[in-house]
Amino acid sequence: MGEFRPRIVFVCSDRHLSLGSTYMRAHQLIELIAPELGEEIDLSISLAPRKSKLWGKIARRLWAARQPRDAIFFVTKSALPVLRPEVAAILKKRGGKICVDYVDGDLDRLLSPAADLHIASSYQSERQLHDLIAERNANAPSVSPKVHTILHGPDIRLANQAVRAQQDTFRMVYFGDPLNCRMSAAQQGEIDVLNAAHAEDFDATFEALGDYSAHYCVRPDAQGGRVTKPFTKGMIAAACGAVPLVNRSVPDAEALLGADYPYFTEGDDDAAVEAAFQKMAAEFGGPNWTQALSATQAMAARVSAPAIAERFRELVRILMPDYPQD
C-alpha cells in the first residue's frame, strides 16, 4: 500500500457511548474489521461533545479543530446533532470527508447536507436514501447523491463466543425485548423467549441461543415513513447457524434470504405464522431445512469480517480517489 494510509475516525456522542447503534456501528465495527485491514487503514474513535448552549458551541468547534487532517469521519447516528454547519466546515477545511450512518433513523428528518457520503445499513434504506436525495435535489442540488451500503450485522459477541445452534431437535426462540414480541397464545406455548432488551440481558442470555435450531423473527408489517430497522434478528439467527421464521415483508428479508426461502410467512397474522411454524417443525432436517440453512449461511457471509472490511475499502475509494483500486 506504500505510504498512503487512509484514516477513518468513527465519531460518537460523548453522551451515548452505550447505545446499541453507537456500540455496534463504531466499537464493534472496528473490532470486526481491524484484523482484516491490518495496517492498511487507520481506525479510531473520537467522542464529540453534545453540550448545550454557548459552551457546547465552543466545545464542538474546539473538538473539530483538534481532529486529524485529511481523515474520513464516519459519523454515527448519536453524533449527528454535533454535525452543525460550522463543525462540518472546520472538518472539511482541514481536508476531511464526512459520511453519515443513519442506521434505523428517520431519513426525512436526519438526512445531512454536510455528508459527502450517506451510509445505508440495509438495502431498503439504500433505496430510500436515493429516492429522498432525488427529491431534495429536484430543484437545485443541495445534498450529495453518493450512497454506500454497509449492512448492519449481529452483535459480534455471538461470533467471539462461537455460539452454534444445535441441529438435533426442532426448538424455536425469540431473542430480544419481550415487549416487542407479538405472539398468539398458541405460539407462546411453542416458542421460548430469551430477554435481550438491554446489554446486561444480552450478556446473561445469549449463550443459551445454542439450544435452539430456529429463531422467531416475525414482526409487524408497517413501520411507516422512511424508517427501516435492519434485519438484525435474522442476522443473529444466521450468526448462530439457526433458521429464521420471518414474514416476507420484513425489509431486506427476501433480498438476503432469497425469494424461494422456504420459511417465509406471507403475513404477520396468527394463522399465517402458525402455519409457517408447523411447516418448519414438520420439515426439520429435510431438504427445505437444508436449503434454509444454506440461505442463512449465505446471509451471514454478507456481514462477515472480510465482506465488511471490503465495504470500508470501497468507502475509502469513493471518498479518496488516490486510494489504490483493485
Image: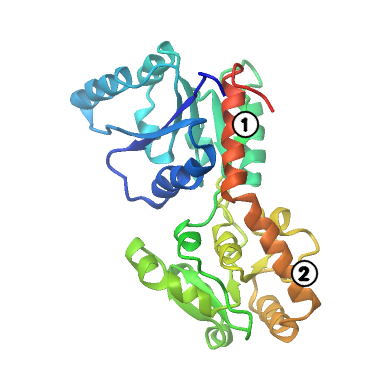
Q: Position of residue 61 (x, y in %)?
A: 28, 19
Marks counted in the figure total 2
Q: Is residue 251 visible?
A: no
Q: Quadrant of the C terminus?
A: top right
Q: Earlier in the sequence, mark 1 or mark 2?
A: 2
**Which image quadrant is residue 293 in?**
bottom right
Q: Position of residue 290 (x, y in %)?
A: 75, 73
Q: Position of residue 155 (x, y in %)?
A: 47, 57
* Mark 1 → mark 2, Cα distance in angstroms: 31 Å
Query: Which disc is residue 291 wearing?
Result: 2
Q: Nearer the viewer, residue 5 or 111?
A: 5
Establish if 267 lies above or below 146. below
Q: Quadrant of the N terminus?
A: top right
For this orientation, the residue located farthest to the top is: 93
Establish if 128 lies above or below 142. below
Establish if 227 lies above or below 59. below
For numbered disc 2, what is the local secondary structure? helix
Q: Nearer the viewer, residue 113 or 253?
A: 253
Query: Residue drawn 61% across and 25% down?
Result: 317
User: Callout 2, which amino acid?
Assistant: Gln
For numbered disc 1, what is the local secondary structure? helix
Query: Residue drawn 76% across and 65% down?
Result: 261
The residue at which mark 1 appears reads as 314
